């Protein structure tokens, strides 16, 4: 298991200026960071990757797609731009030494047609995800598409929808993410839903019901950690908490107020939750197996 933090709460561009913060995360006990890759070139991410390796942090990418490069657009030229954007994401991630691209790479956040996904849009999504997975495989970069709640996207909002696309993509380098915030909205029984689909899930976001400090809302983290342990999950556990540091993202995700008082306390409380619940869940599941 890798305990990590999504750096969107810090900003949209992570550079050498953030070295003290990155070192602080390492000191607190984090194994890695999920870096927003929204702008910039391969050289910038190669330099950031070298810094992360010096500090001792593994890297993953938090990826999105802009409206002008929408993979499910009816316009072939827009879909072509989406292909180039996906390749750029892979190239930057590989240069950074990143292990996985995670996020709503299937469609733009906050962009709607007023209808649910059409058959054509689903087919375009499948084509785009397969092409992305194929391009990323030689670089050793996994793809984890994020099922985002219905208020932020419409092509993939539930684990069932993500699984249906996964089966059609049918590529070993492609999986999808479980996010406790989105599941809290979309799934009737989030913990059980994770257990149903866990073999296809290759990334995991720990996010509170208000996207603030994990453990301060009503997401049942002990039950979620029990499910992770029962299912043998051994990938990234990445905390995602949102603030207002990226105005465009705050607008798309409707974050209009501060969700935590102190960022360093957010970092400390989050890793404490991961370490505490991971160990406690391991002990509970071990007892369950003995009793069984």
Image (cartoon, rainbow, N blue to C red):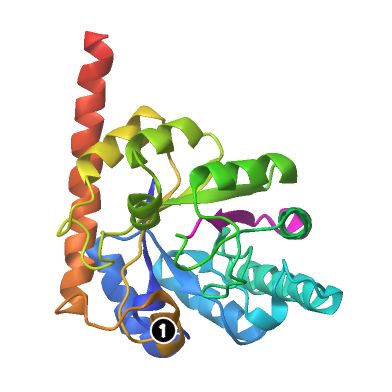
Point out the residue furthest to the right here: 76
Judge by depth and name the residue closer to the eye, 268 or 51: 268
Q: Quick check: 178 above or below 101?
A: above
Residue drawn at point x = 35 percent, y = 81 percent: 10
Quadrant showing the N terminus: top left
Residue 279 drawn at (x, y percent): 21, 39
Query: For this view, does 123 lie left or right of residue 273?
Result: right
Judge by depth and name the residue closer to the eye, 18 or 157: 157
Residue 29 drawn at (x, y percent): 26, 60
Asked whether residue 143 is drawn in magenta, I would say yes
Query: For this view, does 142 lie left or right of residue 77?
Result: left
Residue 133 drawn at (x, y percent): 72, 54
Query: For this view, does 180 lie left or right of residue 165?
Result: left
Judge by depth and name the residue closer to the eye, 13 or 250: 250
Residue drawn at point x = 58 percent, y = 56 percent: 145
Disc 1 target residue: 251
Give the image quarter of residue 256. Answer: bottom left
- Specify whether residue 39 is in view: yes
Query: For this view, does 48 lie left or right of residue 226?
Result: right
Which region shows up in magenta? 132-148
């Amino acid at each position: 298991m890798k305990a990590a933090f999504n750096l969107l709460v810090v900003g949209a561009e992570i550079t050498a200026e953030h070295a003290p913060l990155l070192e602080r995360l390492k000191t607190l006990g984090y194994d890695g960071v999920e870096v927003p890759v929204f702008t910039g070139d391969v050289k910038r991410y190669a330099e950031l990757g070298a810094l992360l390796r010096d500090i001792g942090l593994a890297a993953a990418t938090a990826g999105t797609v802009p409206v002008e490069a929408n993979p499910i657009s009816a316009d072939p030229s827009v879909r072509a731009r989406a292909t180039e954007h996906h390749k750029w994401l892979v190239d930057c991630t590989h240069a950074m030494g990143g292990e996985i691209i995670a996020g709503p790479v299937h469609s733009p956040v906050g962009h709607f047609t007023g209808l649910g996904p059409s058959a054509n849009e689903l087919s375009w999504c499948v084509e785009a995800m397969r092409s992305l997975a194929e391009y990323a495989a030689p670089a050793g970069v996994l793809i984890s598409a994020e099922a985002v709640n219905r208020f932020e996207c419409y092509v993939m909002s539930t684990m069932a929808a993500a699984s249906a696309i996964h089966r059609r993509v049918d590529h070993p380098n492609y999986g999808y993410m479980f996010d406790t915030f989105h599941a809290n909205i979309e799934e009737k029984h989030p913990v059980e839903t994770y257990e149903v689909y866990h073999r296809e899930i290759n990334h995991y976001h720990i996010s509170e019901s208000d996207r603030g400090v994990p453990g301060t809302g009503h997401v049942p983290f002990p039950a979620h950690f029990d499910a992770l342990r029962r299912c043998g999950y051994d990938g990234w556990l990445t905390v995602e908490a949102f603030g207002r540091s990226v105005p465009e993202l705050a607008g798309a995700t409707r974050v209009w107020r501060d969700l935590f008082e102190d960022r360093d306390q957010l970092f400390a409380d989050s890793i404490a939750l991961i370490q505490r619940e991971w160990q406690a869940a391991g002990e509970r599941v071990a007892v369950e197996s003995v009793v069984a």
